Amino acid sequence: MKLDLGPEYEAFRGEMSDWIEANRPDGLEDLDERAMYMGTAGLTGKAAEAYETWSQRLLEARLICPHWPESVGGRGLTGVHMAILNEEFARAGVPRVTRGMGESLVGPSIIVHGSEEQKAHFLPRIISGQDRYCQGFSEPDHGSDLGGVETRAVVDGDEVVIHGSKVWTSGAHLANMIFILCRTDPDVPKHRGLSYVLAPLKDNGIEMRPLRQPSGASGFCQEFIEGARAPLFNVIGGLNNGWRVAMTTLGHERGGQATVAHLGFEREFWDLVETARKRGKTADPLVRQQLAWAYTQVELMRYSGLRTLARVAAGRPPGPEASVAKLFWSEYHKRLGEIAISIEGADGLLRPDGDGYQVSKWQNVFLSSRAGTIYSGTSEIQRNIIGERALGLPKEPKGPRRS
């Protein structure tokens, strides 16, 4: 099944396909952009050179942050254009070169809530790669309860001074900036006294500790913030208006890749089929049933993505299907990791030789996929959103407050 988007969008698809083919350097095949941004995979030698060349060509073509308005350095691409763009990059097996959280989370929030001066200062630095952001939302005692943030900030002259702790901060060890949700007015209801602050990470009273994951990687960190400073100019949306800005950020975080999510999972599925074939297990009825289930789930992702794309093409805003998509793929991937390890058999229990904590490809999927059911809103939170906002069910009863 293919969604007919009309001649304008199909012409854009052809333009992007031709541009990629004409400009891609050798050595880019199937690089994992997210793994590189998170610091769980690195580039060296010719691959690093190819990636740098590719990044520069994308920058010159304004294909970095292309969905941003033209007035701030983007191309003003619509949601449908972005879905097509992502599809063509994925099909060609080349990285789109994103600016991570700067592009997908911070930038859109600045565009919506920032002053013209803030847009002129912060947005070009994101596009160029000069500023690399990580997210300071979750706290040790307040993961999904964003309104319960306890990190404090007080105004000192023309600066804010921040004290507190943040945790599960993806890619913090590679960032030079952090967007922090902090409490600037403790005397008002919890959602009303928050501010959204862009703060430098280095040499700024922030101690960073990497958190080693079961896979051996350290893509997350915890920050201990003791007197970090940021100019009042770096407060987006104004003091005590951070909740609105944070909701804009989260609106861009969930489900943004729904229309192309299946492509990576599809490649991974066929890799697993090949693994089963090499291990002589494709005739096993249980393995065949498990692989059939996995293929069905990937196809459901594809059709769900087409439905989302059709909704965007019709000019309707995305709804709770973003939570449905996030819940679906994260729970699927966790189950796929379990299937992969069962296909590996006893070998799945043995780590490969090498320095450090080595894991095989399928061991990594089994271990790291569990994080997908936690970050960007836990599966429990997504079910609450779906139940309450999509199905109209009563809100979950609140338990007694902890002292």
Image (spheres, helix red, strand yellow):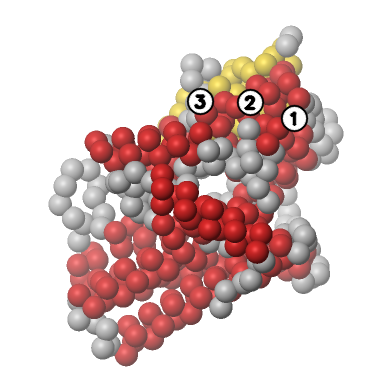
The Cα–Cα distance between marks 3 and 1, rounded to whole angstroms, is 19 Å
**Rendering coords of residue 273 (x, y %):** 31, 75
Q: What residue type is labelled 3?
A: Gln
The Cα–Cα distance between marks 1 and 2, rounded to whole angstroms, is 10 Å
Q: What residue type is labelled 2?
A: Phe
From the viewer's perspective, tell me whether residue 204 is left or right of residue 106.
left
Q: Which residue in the rendered view is the most extreme toward the top?
A: 157
Q: Which one is in front, 60 or 224?
A: 60
Residue designated by label 3: 130
**Rendering coords of residue 67 (x, y %):** 64, 44
Classify 54 as above or below 363: above
Q: Which amino acid does label 1 sit on?
A: Gly
The Cα–Cα distance between marks 3 and 2, rounded to whole angstroms, is 10 Å
Tag 3 and tag 1, C-beta contact below 8 Å: no
Q: Which one is in front, 312 or 3?
A: 3
User: Which of disc 2 and disc 3 is earlier in sequence?
Assistant: 2
Tag 1 and tag 2, C-beta contact below 8 Å: yes
Identify the image quadrant of residue 267: bottom left
Q: What residue is shown at x 18% (from left), y 43% (from top)?
A: 355
**Rendering coords of residue 272 (x, y %):** 32, 71
Q: What residue is shown at x 44% (from left), y 50% (from top)?
A: 20
Residue designated by label 2: 122
Query: Which class describes the residues within 10 Å of circle 3: few (<14), some (14-19), or many (20+)?
Result: few
Which element type, helix, strand or loop, lies under badge 2? helix
Identify the image quadrant of residue 51: top left
From the viewer's perspective, tell me whether residue 220 is left or right of residue 390.
left
User: Residue 403 got which mark?
Assistant: none
Q: What residue is shown at x 15% (from left), y 52% (from top)?
A: 353
Classify 326 as above or below 246: below
Residue designated by label 1: 114
User: Which of disc 2 and disc 1 is earlier in sequence?
Assistant: 1
